Amino acid sequence: MLNTTLNLNEEIFLQDRELKSGRDGFGEAILKLGEEHEDVVILTADLEESLRVTPFRKKFPDRFIETGIAEQNMASIGAGLALSGLVPFITSHAIFSPYRNWDQIRLSICFSNANVKIVGSHAGFSNSPDGGAAESLEDIALTRVLPNLTVISPIDYWQTKRAVEEMYKIKGPVYLRICKEPTPQITTENTPFEVGKAYTLVEGTDITIFNTGTVAYEALEAAKILKAGHKINVEVIAIPTIKPADKENIIGSAKKTGKCVSLEEHQINGGFGSAVSEILAEEFPVFNLRIGVNNTFGESGSYQELKDKYGISSHHVVEAILNMLKEK
Amino acid sequence: MPKSPVKNDVEKIALIANELREEIVRMLLEAESGHTAGSLGMADIFASLYFKILNVDPKNPTNPDRDRFVLSNGHICPLLYATLAERGFFPKSKLKQLRKLNSDLQGHPKFGSLPGLETSSGSLGQGLSQAAGMAMAAKIQNKPYRVYCVTGDGEMQEGQIWEAAMFAPNKKLDNLTWIIDRNNIQIGGHTEDVMPLENLRNKLESFNWYVLEIDGHNIEEIIGACKMARSVSQRPTAIIAHTIPGKGVEFMEYKFEWHGKVPSKEQALKALKSLASLEGKIKSDYD
């Protein structure tokens, strides 16, 4: 079922598959990046361990800046470092950065096109026990609206590692949205990753599921169920770069299947599904059902419980697609 | 306040400051909107910085070793633009484009639009953090440059200022000089009526800044304080510069109403006449 050209993880559906988190990928990748490039600087607002950057701090104490719990200051300091030729990564939980410091990200960073990398961890429901107050379900909307800013939402651990390498090469601001929760590995060390490119994880002909972030796995599982139980051939397209989006692949798949669903761990209003719908509405108007969190805040619970309750797990996708195909 | 032996420079800088004031009035008249009081009030400080203190070269505006000047209260950019033009970063003929469509002279500074601009500013409270970032970059890269940041006083009501005020002494940023335009006004009135800042000196000292207070129109004091800041080790310096909003144009002086207002043609002519009669010999009330 999986696209064989992408070197994806063949063991993805096995019971004892390995689970790994995006933040672990970030911590490992940034250490390597720091070894390779001496202009890489990390800033944290009292979340060093949480972002897995302790090894970087130990190895490069002079390139590690603790700002205390002050995300606004951190963002503007990042701009000052970038305008002086360094490549700062400002790291925190997504709920604080880019939320608390959105104005600083807009003016100090994006308006100057400053080369600051913004890393928001614990995105979506992945900070689930902490409750609705701590769940970032609006950060895609907040960031994709900003000129000059690239927005990347990797689908797993390996892709997060690749994204860190690639975002360094961009001369301008980038937002990296990462997951705290360990999730199944869809990609491998040998899976290609380019900023701005969508990847067809499964080829299909009946309907397309566009997805971003770690819910890519829910999309894959839905495709598997629909194929086995209903003989529906679903195309699964992962879109790790939300801005700039890969219009060509989005429109190409929509032309092929004629029916689309978007899946995100985020509000459907203004987020990833909105971005896909905007492209389709302007370039190739087909129906796109946005699946995501619908105009509500989250609550405490386990990661999977919340995905189930708020309608973004595989069985919701299966149900939605069956309804869509029945109606059409 | 110690005075520096720069007598010859003082008159020259005072003349430049007065020219900057005239330029500001002409620019704001042409633009028909903008911020007058703060721009006029800081002219002596900008003239002193750009013609005596800052190690900058208009022919090489991106030299990695240059001193950095960060304007945090971006609304007084007419003064920054006039100063950069006077210093030769771009032709003075550009100044009349302030706030016009397709202009490099945006209503608030946009990084990249003009040589010599170091940051973007507008939304208040962000400049001190950016300056601290530049000062950190100098430490990380072992570079000799210094960073100078101007903020307004009303701007200090923004919480981010105090985040940066905690950060810079903690990181021992002795290459950072913060100049506070203490003119006691903001758009809605006097700072002490809107949201008091006093005792400002005590606040900054308790945050572990080395604090100097000067008459912001006394050029010898301005230069002396900036030079003294260079010799302070292990902590940053804050210079509380007491200034008169609207300085040099009598009917504007001390009046918060001129914070965000521009003169009419008649008022501008009156202002230019009174500035011309000063001939660079502005005397401060603190003298």
Image (cartoon, coloured by chain):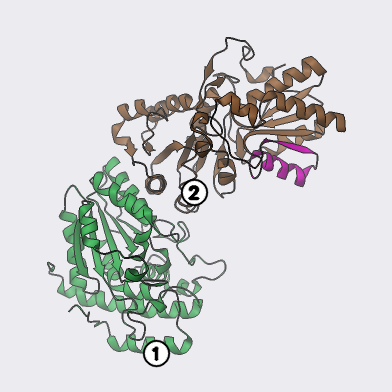
- Residue at 37% of width from left, 27% of height from top? A35
Amino acid carrying label 2: it is Trp
**Can you tell which mark lies on residue A102?**
2
Specify start and end residues of the magenta stretch as a single range. Answer: A268-292
Report the quarter where the N terminus of chain B lies: bottom left
In-front residue for pair A135/A20: A135
Residue at 46% over, 40% down: A117
Q: Position of residue B145 (x, y in %)?
A: 27, 51
Q: Position of residue B183 (x, y in %)?
A: 30, 71
Instruction: Give the number of marks.
Output: 2
User: Can you tell which chain is drawn green?
Assistant: B
Q: Residue at label 1?
A: B270
Secondary structure type for disc 2: helix
Q: Given the current orientation, which residue lies at the most extreme front position?
A: A300
Say whether residue A145 is left or right of residue B180. right
Is residue A136 shown above or below A207?
below
Name which residue lies at 48% across and 75% down.
B96
> Is disc 1 placed on a helix, strand or loop?
helix
Front-most of residues B281 and A117: A117
Chain under numbered label 1 = B
Q: Position of residue B61 (x, y in %)?
A: 37, 57
Q: Position of residue B76 (x, y in %)?
A: 40, 69
Question: Which quadrant of the structure image shows residue B53?
Answer: bottom left
Q: Is residue B281 above or below residue A231?
A: below
Q: Which mark is residue B46?
A: none
Which hue is chain A drawn in? brown
Left or right: residue A226 versus residue B260 is right
Q: Residue at x 24, y 56 (%)?
A: B204
Residue A328 is left or right of residue B222, and the answer is right
